[in-house]
């Protein structure tokens, strides 16, 4: 639990998308920012029950996750959205485990380079890739300013 900072102008462009509603099938209605963020968490399939997101100057998120990995993925999915500068985490974890550290991607970084810096072995990059799924869809699709989970080695 705490406050996590992100680069406000880096990340996925999520706001401004429109969604068709069942109540008004012909008219398009713009989603609120909180609804757009909830929709993104659902799209990614991140398991959080009682998910609540409030968006004012920053995001405040609460709910219940089974593991720290799920909690961390929710924080990163929210924080790696353009226009988000910080996420206040109030997610309860039912089965706590060691927390990951977060790493800000710098220009020239690759998952192999990050793995070498953190683990001492560039061939451990799949650990970082797997820890950041479903937000990452390919090991080469990272960008400066993005925040990644770096889990401890087992």
Image (cartoon, grey):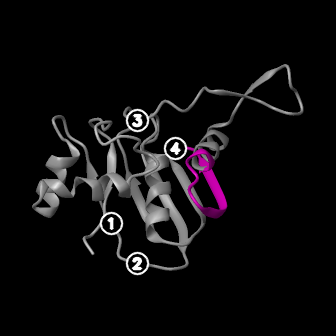
Give the SS element for disc 4.
loop
Q: Which residue position is annotated with label 1?
A: 100
For the view shown, which residue lies furthest in the right direction? 23
Q: Give whichever of 95, 13 is nearer the camera.
A: 95
Residue 66 vertical placement versus 3 (above, below): below
- Mark 2 touches mark 1? (CB < 8 Å): no
User: Which of the two discs, 2 and 4, sits closer to the camera?
Assistant: 2
Q: Earlier in the sequence, mark 3 or mark 2?
A: 3
Q: Which residues are magenta?
A: 42-56
Q: Which residue position is annotated with label 3?
A: 11
| Left or right of 39, for residue 138 | left
Task: Based on the picture, tell me whether residue 49 belongs to the magenta stretch.
Answer: yes
Near mark 3 (Cα within 10 A), the count class, few <14, some 14-19 or many ≥20, is many
Q: Earlier in the sequence, mark 2 or mark 4?
A: 4
Residue 107 vertical placement versus 102 (above, below): above
Whole-number angstrom distance, CA of label 4 to CA of label 3: 17 Å
Whole-number angstrom distance, CA of label 1 to CA of label 3: 20 Å
Residue 56 vertical placement versus 48 (above, below): above
Q: Give whichever of 1, 154 is nearer the camera.
A: 154
Q: Give whichever of 103, 43 is nearer the camera.
A: 43
Q: Earlier in the sequence, mark 4 or mark 1?
A: 4
């Amino acid at each position: 639990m705490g406050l996590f900072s992100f680069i406000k102008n880096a990340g996925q462009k999520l706001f401004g998308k429109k969604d068709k509603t069942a109540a008004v099938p012909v008219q398009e209605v713009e989603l609120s920012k909180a609804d757009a963020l909830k929709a993104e968490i659902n799209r990614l399939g991140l398991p959080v029950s009682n998910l609540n997101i409030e968006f004012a100057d920053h995001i405040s998120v609460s709910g219940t996750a089974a593991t720290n990995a799920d909690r961390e993925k929710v924080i990163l999915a929210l924080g790696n959205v353009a226009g988000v500068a910080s996420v206040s985490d109030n997610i309860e974890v039912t089965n706590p485990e060691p927390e990951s550290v977060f790493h800000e991607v710098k220009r020239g970084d690759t998952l192999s380079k990050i793995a070498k810096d953190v683990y001492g072995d560039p061939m451990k990059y799949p650990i970082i890739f797997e820890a950041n799924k479903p937000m990452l869809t390919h090991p080469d699709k990272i960008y400066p300013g993005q925040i990644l989970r770096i889990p401890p080695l087992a």
